Image (cartoon, grey):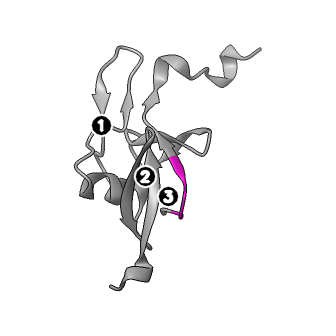
Amino acid sequence: MNNSDIIDIEIDGKVIKAVKGQTIAEALLANDIQIFRWTRKNEPRGIYCNMGICYECRIIVNGFPNVRACLTPVTAGCKVKTQKDADIRLEDERS
């Protein structure tokens, strides 16, 4: 790995280092960030299956909610936010 493989991403307003090719989940865990979202009951959630099946690692990426961190690669300058499910409206609630 060389310096050109290191990129910056933002999580909740804080800039952290990531490596090209990592998933967002890998980058967050490498930076000691273990809580990716809060449930509607205000319970913390993070990585669980790490293969896209359980949906526990949902985060907000560049304004888009419900992105699975374990499947999404980092991109330079991406803005990640811890998801608060109580703030996310479900499809059936929008009508």
Relative to 17, say whether 53 is above or below: above
Residue found 53% across the figure and 63% down from its top? 75
First in residue order: circle 1 vs circle 3: 1
Circle 3 packing at 10 Å, graded few (<14), some (14-19), many (20+), is some
At label 1, the amino acid type is Ile
Residue found 43% across the figure and 38% down from its top? 12
In magenta stretch: residue 78: yes
Judged by depth in the image, the label closer to the viewer, 2 or 1, is 1
Q: State which quarter of the image contains the N terminus.
A: bottom left
Q: Badge 3 is on which residue?
A: 72
Circle 1 packing at 10 Å, graded few (<14), some (14-19), many (20+), is some
Judged by depth in the image, the label closer to the viewer, 2 or 3, is 3
> Distance from label 2 to label 3 (Cα)?
10 Å
Q: Badge 1 is on which residue?
A: 35
The magenta segment: 75-79
First in residue order: circle 2 vs circle 3: 2
Q: Nearer the viewer, residue 95 or 5?
A: 5
Where disc 2 sits, the SS reads loop
Q: Which mark is residue 69?
A: none
Circle 2 packing at 10 Å, graded few (<14), some (14-19), many (20+), is some
Q: Nearer the viewer, residue 42 or 75?
A: 75
Residue found 48% across the figure and 17% down from its top? 86
Extreme residue toward the left, this view: 32
Residue found 39% across the figure and 42% down from its top? 57
Q: Badge 2 is on which residue?
A: 52
In the shown orientation, is residue 89 left or right of residue 6?
right
In magenta stretch: residue 13: no
First in residue order: circle 2 vs circle 1: 1
Where disc 3 sits, the SS reads loop
At label 3, the amino acid type is Thr
